[in-house]
Amino acid sequence: MWTETLVVASLIAFATYFCWYAFVGKTLQPITNEEADLTWRLHKKNSGCKGSRITDMLSYRGKVIGFRCDCGYEFKQKRLLGQNVQKHPTPVDNQSQETPRAGLPG
Ligand SMILES: [Zn+2]
């Protein structure tokens, strides 16, 4: 029947739309300016990029999720499906490791 076809077709369309929406929403992760800067430096180092700066911050739904380099390279923070990102943040150990040894009698 034609109504059945119509229902199935709209279900498929809806499912496709929903999957796409969920996929994009789940895979694009917001990043901080520091992360963008770090990733950009990595990109420059790895690709020998001659770009001098980030020309654009890419955002999705009001959050920064990537950047565009001077050279045209685009980075978007993505999370692999099935990858568990519930990692504990690694403790940052930059507490006075290089304290200047001032005041030593000598
Ligand atoms: Zn670049």
Image: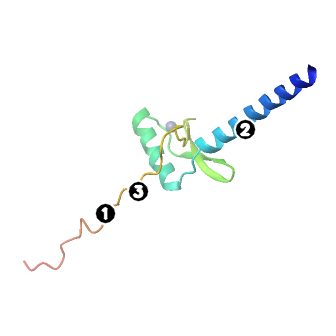
Give the labeled residue for mark 2: 18
Q: Amino acid at mark 1?
A: Asn
Q: Is residue 2 left or right of residue 12?
A: right
Mark 3 sits on what residue?
A: 89
> Closer to us: mark 2 or mark 1?
2
Residue beneath disc 1: 94
The residue lying toward the viewer, choosing from 35 and 4, is 4
For the N terminus, the quadrant is top right
Q: Nearer the viewer, residue 6 or 106?
A: 6
Going by the numbered disc 3, the residue's amino acid type is Pro
Query: Residue drawn at (30%, 62%), measured in percent from left and top?
Result: 93
Please tell me whether mark 1 sits on a helix, a strand or a loop: loop
Badge 2 local density, few (<14 within 10 Å), some, or many (20+)?
few
State the CA–CA distance, disc 3 to disc 1: 15 Å
Where in the figure is residue 19, as x and y percent of width and height?
69, 36
Q: Please, what is the three-letter code of the amino acid marked with disc 2?
A: Phe
Q: Nearer the viewer, residue 14 or 71?
A: 14
Question: Under tag 2, what secondary structure?
Answer: helix
Classify 10 Å Cα crowding around label 1: few (below 14), some (14-19), many (20 and above): few
SS class, disc 3? loop
Q: What colour scheme was applied to this rendering of the protein?
A: rainbow
Q: Are marks 3 and 1 in contact (CB under 8 Å)?
A: no
Q: Return the residue found at the far right.
A: 2
Inter-mark Cα distance, 2 to 1:
44 Å
Mark 2 or 3, closer to the camera: 2
Q: Looking at the image, which is closer to me, 16 or 42?
A: 16
